[in-house]
Amino acid sequence: MQYEAVIGLEIHAQLLTESKMFCGCPTKFGAEPNTQTCPVCVGLPGVLPVINKRAIEYVVKTGLALNCEITQYSRFARKNYFYPDLPKGYQISQYELPLCRGGYLEIALNGRRKKIRLTRIHLEEDAGKNIHEGGDYSLVDLNRAGVPLMEIVTEPDIRSAQEAAEFMRRLRMILRYLGVCDGNMEQGSLRCDANVSVRPAGQEGFGVKTEIKNMNSFKFIEKALEYEINRQIRLLSKGEKIVQETRLWDAKRGITESMRSKEEAHDYRYFPEPDLMPVEIDEGWLNEIRAQIVELPDARMERFIKEYNLPEDDARLLTEERAMADWFEEAVRLGGHPKTVANWMMGELLRLLNKDGIQIEDSKVKPAQLVGLLSLIDRDVISGKIAKTVFEEMYQTGREAEVIVKEKGLLQITDTEEIERIVEDILNNNPKEVERFRAGEQKLLGFFVGQVMKATKGKANPRIVNELLRKKLSA
Amino acid sequence: MMEIEYIALLARLRLTEEEKELFSRQLGSIIDYINKLNRLDTSDVEPTSHVLPIKNVFREDRQGVSSERDEILRNAPSKKGGFYKVPKIIE
């Protein structure tokens, strides 16, 4: 029988605010345990939370970018449960009146476009972190408790592990463009859980689902879901039943495994948070937020194709990250030829940045400096080959191309007479090769070019070298 | 009785048989009392989310000062190396 997978995602994104959701504690990752807490976020009696305005704006911004309906009158709710990383005994979240409803995100896979609908986006606070180091106890760090967390829930529109991973890739790109989340899946600032079920192809109703957690990279999302889909199909094919449960992805073993927690009643007893006033978003505020939304990756890619005449693949790669697209446009604005700039970025610059694990915004080479290098090539001051060496040096030191070229004596030799002398030397020293060439072994031209370049340390203008060689050899 | 045990479980309370008996009765009478409200016709009344007519109480996204760790951990029944120490969490 043919089976079809049905997947819905639940994504948690930590918002890039300076301070926590309801207090002024910092949100920086990696601080010493329990150094970023206060009576509000550890839930001491008598404290009052106050809503971080920027967190509301970030969620609304995301909602607008994802085509959601923004709830004009929204409020917070208490979700009650006990867990050591939740000091208050309840999480401030949203329930029946989330900030955003509906919406969709379009993905493209194998040339096919598909809209994945969203159910809702709401705002809540993150919990702390539990650490198990063995022994009969656990340790709790509450630095993360109270960090603003945006929850995005999709409809069960996803049909494969690849679609799920692609959805996450697109979503991460958009969140980073909007500047609302840094998208770091390994550090957990972007997390993804999935509800997975399978059903005979063509069937309307859903099968029994499992919830998959602990997938902290795109690769793992794809692997975990693929494993889980196959596991469920295998069971159903044998006539066995799927148990509704939460399963953890075990990256080392490459399997999903039942959490086997005592299935305690999940009864969250939501009720409106009495410590917080409702949030009303009027037209004026909405327009203010809308005005802050930058051009998003899809639109920017289309524009790069039209405005700069770039091939689609180039445009897509250059617009994946906002900082990269900005870098490109800055170089073009300063006079770089678009396709040439694109080639240098995708070739040399990205190769070096990836090798060192550096983000483009931290690159020592700035757009103006690449343009400076390109102009040296255009004006025949240096050869394209030398330019790569110069670029490496620029990348390491952040110095100007012109300075490096002068200092290292890399100026291209464009003096025809000087090159002619060298060409004659080479021909005189290699009489056998000259004879063979004249006898028809045309491919030896490359040998002569190589010799000239060797003699000039690559500085001879290749166009002039080729011209002279052809002239002399045919004489 | 089932209900009181369920509520006690959610609240992590261990009740004796006598307490279960007592609280069952008391909770029952509280619920009966509150249920009087159900006799009111509220079909024309807007739902109230808060008794005060206030909305949009915000703070700007600015960092304040966190508590000293030693100070805040003084409230912890048990601690270790700057962490709260709790009974082992089994997942």
Image (cartoon, coloured by chain):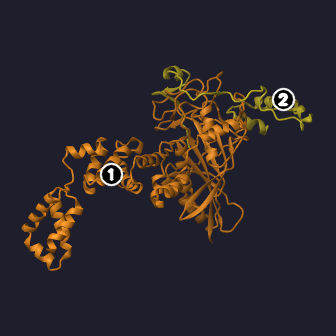
Contact flag, marks 1 and 2 (Cβ < 8 Å) = no
Circle 2: residue type: Ile
Residue A207 image point, x, y percent: 67, 60
The numbered disc on residue A231 is none
Estimate how packed mark 2 is, as few (under 14), some (14 to 19) or many (20 or more) residues with alpha carbons within 10 Å.
few
Query: As displayed, is residue A5 above or below residue A49?
Result: below
Give the colour in which the image draws chain B.
yellow
Callout count? 2
**Does residue B41 appear left or right of residue A171 in this picture?**
right
Q: As rendered, which of A309 and B37 lies closer to the eye?
A: A309
- The residue labelled by disc 1 is A374
Give the colour in which the image draws chain A.
orange
Chain letter belonging to callout 2: B
The numbered disc on residue B30 is 2
Q: As rendered, which of A185 and A386 lies closer to the eye?
A: A386
**Does residue A327 appear left or right of residue A273 in this picture?**
left
Residue B63 image point, x, y percent: 53, 26
- Please name the residue shown 26% across and 55% down the image: A380
